[in-house]
Amino acid sequence: MSATLEALSQNLQEHLGDRLKSIKVALGEVTIEVDVADYLSVMQTLRNEPGLGFEELIDLCGVDYSTYGHDTREGPRFAAVTHLLSIARNWRLRVRCFAADDVLPSVPSVTAIWNSADWFEREAFDLYGIVFPGHEDLRRILTDYGFIGHPFRKDFPISGYVEMRYDPEQQRVIYQPVTIEPREVTPRIVREENYGDVDNA
Amino acid sequence: MPELRNFTLNFGPQHPAAHGVLRMVLELDGEVVVRADPHIGLLHRATEKLAETRTWIQSVPYMDRLDYMSMMCNEHAYCMAIERLLQIDVPIRAQYIRVMFDEITRILNHLLWVGCHGLDVGAMTMVLYAFREREDLVDAYEAVSGARMHAAYYRPGGVYRDLPDRMAQYQESKWKSAAQIRPFNEARSGSLLDFLDDFVGRFPKLLDEYETLLTDNRIWKQRLVDVGIVTPERALQRGFSGPMLRGSGIAWDLRKKQPYEVYDRVDFDIPVGVTGDSYDRYLVRMEEMRQSNRIVKQCIDWLRQNPGPVMSDNHKVAPPDREAMKSNMEELIHHFKLCTEGIHVPAGEVYSAVEHPKGEFGVYVVSDGANKPYRLKIRPPGYVHLSAMNEMARGHMLADVVTIIGSQDVVFGEIDR
């Protein structure tokens, strides 16, 4: 672990204390996990504390963990993952916050702390249906006007439910159920450990 | 006194200055913008969801189609993410080739930008000059990958193949005699590196030519100076990166601050703006082209002297060469597994960012150990810049909106993904 990462994880532990659910350093990156109740206050600290100094929010995205890995997964399904960057200290951080409810996932909005979260939260809402209370203008952003469903959820088929075409009889564009069959060329394979008696790393 | 209402105007999606399929609902008070509401997603192809259903390598060509003006930089971020998850090393020669092509891509992107930006604000000639030079650079793309745009040249573990020893030449035809095409073929008589060397020698002079057309041009300055000013504080708050951030006076460049590949071995400077207006961003991008030119020159010199492999020899990741595959059973198995099942990437997550011509282009991948990504998130710089549109355009005239879109350098392939 390099000196910068060590300093960062030390500062995180010092300033966040109990609010830190877990901290992990892997592949040269620091990931912290926080509880949804502490999320806003943690984000405030991360931005305002000079020892952390994350003045820029680089990315915020939703993740659906429902089909992760081999076995059926326990625990909450949706998470909001945020990537922060400190220009003054030249380090990065990943913050993961699981939404408590799977039916109506909700994570507080950080737009007041970093204005750049605006469109990222709209995107996460659009694609995953995670709502961000506190966001002033939570509309769909990437999908079509009048789109139904949240397309990036793992239970949403890749080909979707409806397709659009021009109908010469009605002389307008119509929506109809999809006619293409879903197919998978290369199946998804997660190898069991020590497959073929070799180290597969 | 009659009741006055603001006028609402639909800008795009078929406006020639909208740089693609931007639809913007503008609320106007007279000719002054009160509110700008960009509607995006008209080019949404769900690249990230598609990538979840393909093997790791099959998604490389999708990356070209994100920011279709800086193709190889997109691939770079994606390949680097996979390499970091796999913890494999890229041969040094491949790293130099990548840096060289990243900078060629930067020049390609900025040339197109200066051409189109000029076109938008009324400097018609620029686009003709810019495309003349782009032609040489897309020829370099074609020489290494066979495609002029969507190269798919970077692969996890290195680059697809080494630089070619000869360039394609113009052929004599009904319309062009042998004497007419001879000057065109002069620079093409040697290898790709000779061809690029010739370009790098010519390019600074050509840049001076562009600057005579624009930099001190009265009309150009009237259209750009003090339009769309972003203070450094607001730039950080809005998540800006790349030339947009440097135009506001913050010397932040991933190539310098968090160097990847061999950027710490090449010599270059970061230009920084002062006022943060569109004119400063123009100056920053022009200077960036000069710096990229310097980097390309240094890479050419190094690549001439240092032959070597350009692809990792880890055959769990990179395919073996054809000869070995046909004579060696083990390599045959590797080849078969790679082409049917694809590579397996250990479980974990990684965020890899490159200094893309437009800003910070990041790829966040979550892997669960399968032969396909579990989740791929692309962090497009243009998406963040465009989200600041309302703030930048408010209080400006309608015609300035075109300048601001131009100076943001938006491309919808990456914004809509």
Image: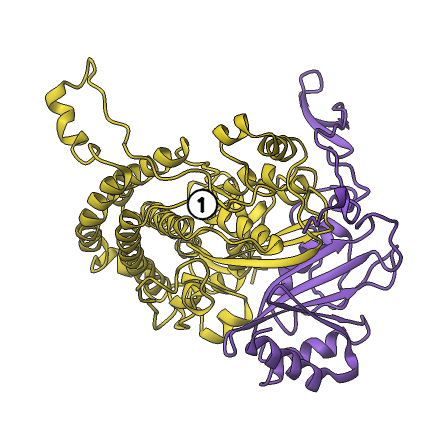
Chain colours: A purple, B yellow
Residue B378 in the image, given as x and y percentages of width and height = 59, 52
Front position in the image: B336 or B240: B336
Q: Which chain is mark 1 on?
A: B
B394 displayed left or right of B214: right
Residue drawn at the location 40% of the way across and 30% of the way down: B146
Front position in the image: B340 or A103: B340
A195 displayed left or right of B250: right
The quarter in which the N terminus of chain A is drawn is bottom right
B87 displayed left or right of A73: left
Residue B328 in the image, given as x and y percentages of width and height = 56, 30
Residue drawn at the location 39% of the way across and 34% of the way down: B148
Residue extending farthest front: B328
Q: Does the rendering let one see residue B10?
A: no
Location of mark 1 (residue): B72
Front position in the image: A173 or B74: B74
Q: Quadrant of residue B273?
A: bottom left
Above or below: residue A45 compared with residue B118 = below
B304 displayed left or right of B113: left
Q: Amino acid at mark 1?
A: Met
